[in-house]
Image: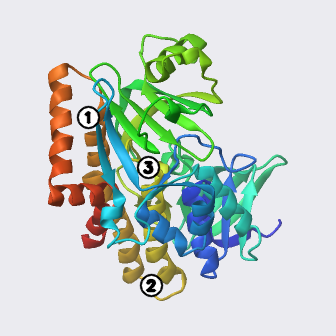
Amino acid sequence: MAAVERCQVAIAGAGPVGTVLATLLAQAGIDVVVLEVGADCAQDLRASTFHPPTLEMLDQIGITPMLLEKGLKAPVYHWRDRHSGEVIDFDLDEISDVTRYPFRIQCEQYHLSRALASGLEKQGNADVRFGSRLLTFEEDADGVNLAIETMTGIERLRADYLIGADGANSVVRKWLGIEFDGFTYPERFLCLSTAFDIGKHLPNLAWVNYVSDPDEWLVLLRVPTLWRVLVPTDGSLSDEELRSDAMKNEIFGRLVGDGSMVETQHRTLYRVHQRVAQSFREGRVMLAGDAAHLNNPLGGFGMNSGVHDAFNLFEKLLPVLKGQKAGGAAEENLALYDRQRREVTHSFTQMQTKENMAMIRGGQDEAHKRRREAMLAIKQDDERRRAYMLRQAMFESLSQAAAIR
């Protein structure tokens, strides 16, 4: 029988979370193997916002300059009332005293994954294996045995630790039998991408806009070459109706007057979830990113919180791998990752994204009026406005996590 291949850390999933964690480990001298089902890093069209603390973290692995070059710098974001045309603006330059990146970067997440995967391939102690599906694994006291399906057969790999960064349908989480508590929003969401210059039709448009009115809400944001429009859909309509030209024309017609003149590059339907795994760790197996938690996209917290998972887990796992923490100290270090990231997911990310969803959702005139008044009150109060921007930029969530011991 052939000898079983070994590595220190195996990571399921080559998305942003998996590739960030693999890069951190490889740069620290750890042998790491990344397993990815697809033939390339997935081109997910949803996540595109990088918040200031995430940019600071990614600077540690040398990838932030690429994001700054490829992406759009968005220091200002708007809450807009479509009926009145009123704009309530927030400028992250006000928190430039706490970050060297007082802005969001709008850039599709796959640029990050692909750049990091390419960099990993040049590292002698890292291996990214596309077309490799984790089938199952068994943990014992000293490591984890993995069975991996490739195009030509079943391969075996033994790792000291396994990280499940394999997304919402995580095989790692399912094999662990960890419950994924929460709910799914009744609306499905339709994402439309277009190169059409919407800014010519809507004055004073920021790169990031949350648009609310009593009838229909939407998110309107810019990535380097396209505008994206995210809208909730009518659950009684079929996929074909929702992706139809008629639907596209209606949505853009309410924005620019004549929707028929707008061509789209993508029309994507998906469901949105609020879910958190009951545990982010079992023994030598950890969960991170969408495998551990899901939230609605309002605020751009999903991918960012996953990257924050990766950095937190790296901080806890590296001293264990280096032999600096063993026995009970190693156990406590890994348990602290679970406590910090799981608790902050509940106390901040889930709560904040639910609040964002409630704030922007359509409703009766009176509810819409209350939402507008709430945002104006934040805007007009210096202390509340600063606290709001620190919260939306995710600095508050990192402070909360650090306080958990």
Question: Tag on residue 358?
Answer: 1
**Disc 3 residue crowd, few under 14, some 14–19, many 20+, Cα 10 Å:** many
Position in image of residue 180 (x %, y %): 39, 43
Mark nearer the viewer, 3 or 2? 3
**Residue 229 in view of the camera:** yes
Residue at (64, 82) in percent of width and height: 29
Position in image of residue 40 (x %, y %): 73, 49
**Does residue 40 lie above or below 22 as drawn?**
above
Residue 104 position by quadrant: bottom left
Give the CA distance from mark 2 to mark 1. 46 Å
**Disc 2 residue crowd, few under 14, some 14–19, many 20+, Cα 10 Å:** some
Q: Secondary structure at mark 3?
A: helix
Q: Looking at the picture, which amino acid does disc 1 mark?
A: Ala
Give the CA distance from mark 3 to mark 2. 32 Å
Q: Looking at the picture, which amino acid does disc 2 mark?
A: Ala
Residue at (35, 27) in percent of width and height: 217
Q: As rendered, which of 122 and 330 lies closer to the eye?
A: 122
Question: Tag on residue 302?
Answer: 3
Residue farthest to the bottom, as pictured: 324
Mark nearer the viewer, 2 or 1? 1
Q: Looking at the picture, which amino acid does disc 3 mark?
A: Gly
Badge 2 vs badge 1, beta-carbon distance below 8 Å: no
Residue at (68, 61) in percent of width and height: 115
Position in image of residue 174 (x %, y %): 50, 45
**Does residue 214 lie above or below 274 as drawn?**
above
Q: As rendered, which of 220 and 124 lies closer to the eye?
A: 220
Q: Earlier in the sequence, mark 3 or mark 2?
A: 3
Q: As rendered, which of 76 and 4 lies closer to the eye?
A: 76
**Disc 1 residue crowd, few under 14, some 14–19, many 20+, Cα 10 Å:** few
Quadrant in the picture for the N terminus: bottom right
Q: Is residue 224 left or right of residue 333?
A: right
Position in image of residue 298 (x %, y %): 38, 41
